[in-house]
């Protein structure tokens, strides 16, 4: 009996071994290795990973060949920005002479009788995929004026920006327009952008630029890659990336292209690992006590401190992704988002608006989102309504200190407007 059981066990293990070897052979024969030495099976890149130099080079060469007409252009301070006096999205996204989204220009000094609000953030703030008049920045300006509050809203949002670039755009340009209120469109998922230097290493189809990046040195923010490496020097950097000085600051190079697991010699094991990890977020980018998490918190703190230093009111507005809303409205207890600590920090320390707490679960439906998972027109209008109500209430209660106005009620078109709204 014992001998029979042992024989059956050996047969089972032998069968598993043979099946594993056959599957290993299938993956090896069915996959292919590209010009950069990267092995790919069914669209999944397997460990060990090879830097996609050919793809990176193509993106840079494409930009250099068309840089005179490109709407998104190299910026030595910010990495990239919008070309002044240009349009994108088939003419529905207008950039003014100062390089931010608007169909008109704004004087550096705000009107004496009008509230000036400035927005900073990424594509969710810029309003990608909707028209000029549909973007929540423009809707906010219209609503506030319709509610009797004289106001103008300047939109400094730029697609693919990290928190660091939003902060730097405030320092480099935004503060010179002397806003009374600064609203930071907070995308905590963008913590992964803060530890990124070369955009294409984070997103293969991203802008072919490098970006400035903060590092923490004894708790203090220090800026690296400033001025940023110009596109003309990127190809040489990619071709010998491991020896480039900036490689040490590129999280998405160190975590993906340098380190590999001990079992990476097995194509089958690498396939299983790659399939499981495709949509899994790296906790080292989001949690408190990690480089990504602590750096993001420090950037938001520095942003708010610099805004407050100019006697300007700071608002952190959480603009949730569809995936965040799906977790938020789930009937089952959702796993805590990895970046919850950053949202709670903002809630405790700043004027904070949690958009997800003010909308209906129906807005999770795909019909409210664009093909690239940005907000559609209805969500833009909802955000504008939420922010407008928050600002009106803040002014009425005196919770928004405005250094330019001893009596904020003078901003309303009539003495009864504030009370009516």
Image (spheres, rainbow, N blue to C red):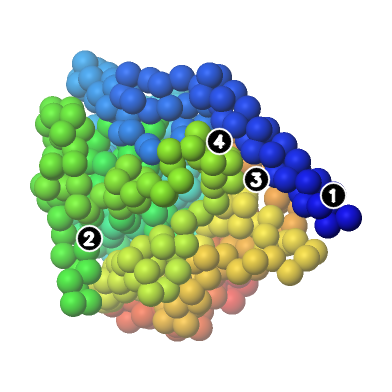
Occupied quadrant, residue 15: top right
For mark 3, does the 10 Å Cα neighbourhood hold few (<14), some (14 to 19), or many (20 or more) residues? some
Q: Which mark is residue 100?
A: none
Quarter that holds the N terminus: bottom right
Q: Is residue 3 left or right of residue 125?
A: right
Circle 2: element type: strand
**Which residue position is annotated with label 1?**
4
Mark 2 lies on residue: 214
Which of labels 1 and 2 is toward the front?
Answer: 1
Q: Secondary structure at mark 4?
A: helix
Left or right for 3, reference 210: right
Q: Residues within 10 Å of mark 4 (few under 14, many from 20)?
A: many
- Residue 300's x, y, as percent? 34, 68
Above or below: residue 109 compared with residue 77: below
Question: How far apart in space, not on screen, are marks 2 and 4 (Cα)?
Answer: 38 Å
- Gap between marks 3 and 2 measured at Cα: 36 Å
Q: Position of residue 402 (x, y in %)?
A: 34, 76
Separation (CA) of disc 3 from disc 1: 69 Å
- Image coordinates of residue 34 in percent, x first then y, are 38, 20
Question: Residue drawn at (22%, 53%), measured in percent from left and top?
Answer: 249
Q: Is residue 202 above or below residue 328?
A: above
Q: Categorize mark 2 by other alpha carbons within 10 Å: few (<14), some (14-19), many (20+).
A: many
- Residue at image mark 3: 378
Query: Would residue 3 appear left or right of 198 to someone viewing this image?
Result: right
N-term-proximal mark, 4 vs 1 = 1
Q: Position of residue 348 (x, y in %)?
A: 47, 82
Q: Secondary structure at mark 1?
A: helix
Q: Earlier along the polypeptide chain: callout 1 or callout 2?
A: 1
Mark 4 lies on residue: 268
The residue depicted at 38 percent of the width and 28 percent of the height is 38
């Amino acid at each position: 009996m014992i001998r029979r059981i042992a024989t059956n066990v050996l047969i089972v293990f032998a069968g598993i071994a043979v099946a594993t070897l056959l599957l290993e052979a299938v993956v090896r024969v069915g996959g292919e290795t590209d010009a950069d030495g990267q092995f790919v099976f069914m669209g999944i890149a397997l460990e060990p990973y090879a830097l996609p130099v050919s793809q990176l080079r193509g993106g840079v060469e494409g930009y250099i060949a068309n840089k005179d007409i490109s709407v998104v252009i190299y910026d030595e301070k910010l990495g990239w920005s919008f070309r002044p006096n240009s349009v994108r999205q088939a003419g529905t996204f207008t950039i003014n002479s100062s390089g931010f989204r608007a169909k008109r220009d704004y004087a550096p000094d705000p009107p004496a009788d009008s509230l000036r609000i400035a927005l900073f953030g990424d594509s969710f703030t810029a309003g990608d995929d909707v028209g000029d008049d549909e973007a929540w920045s423009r809707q906010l300006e219209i609503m506030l004026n319709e509610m009797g509050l004289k106001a103008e809203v300047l939109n400094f949002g730029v697609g693919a920006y990290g928190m660091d670039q939003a902060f730097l755009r405030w320092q480099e340009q935004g503060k010179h327009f002397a806003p009374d209120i600064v609203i930071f469109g907070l995308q905590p998922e963008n913590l992964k952008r803060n530890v990124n230097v070369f955009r294409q290493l984070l997103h293969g189809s991203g802008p072919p630029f490098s970006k400035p990046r903060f590092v923490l040195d004894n708790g203090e923010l220090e800026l690296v890659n400033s001025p940023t490496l110009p596109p003309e020097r990127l190809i040489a950097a990619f071709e010998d990336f491991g020896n480039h000085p900036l490689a040490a600051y590129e999280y998405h190079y160190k975590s993906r292209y340098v380190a590999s697991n001990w079992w990476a010699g097995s194509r089958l094991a690498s396939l299983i690992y790659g399939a499981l990890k495709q949509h899994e977020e790296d906790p080292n980018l989001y949690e408190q006590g990690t480089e990504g998490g602590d750096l993001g918190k420090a950037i938001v703190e520095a942003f708010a401190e610099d805004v407050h230093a100019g006697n300007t009111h700071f608002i952190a507005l959480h603009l949730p992704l569809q995936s965040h809303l799906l977790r938020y409205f789930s009937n089952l207890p959702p796993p805590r988002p990895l970046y919850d600590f950053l949202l709670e920090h903002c809630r405790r320390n700043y004027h904070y608006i949690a958009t997800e707490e003010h909308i209906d679960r129906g807005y999770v439906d795909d019909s409210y989102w664009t093909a690239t998972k940005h907000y559609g027109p209805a969500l833009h209008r909802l955000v504008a309504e939420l922010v407008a109500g928050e600002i009106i209430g803040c002014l009425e209660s005196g919770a928004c200190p405005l250094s330019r106005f001893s009596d904020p009620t003078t901003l309303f078109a009539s003495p009864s407007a504030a009370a009516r709204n």
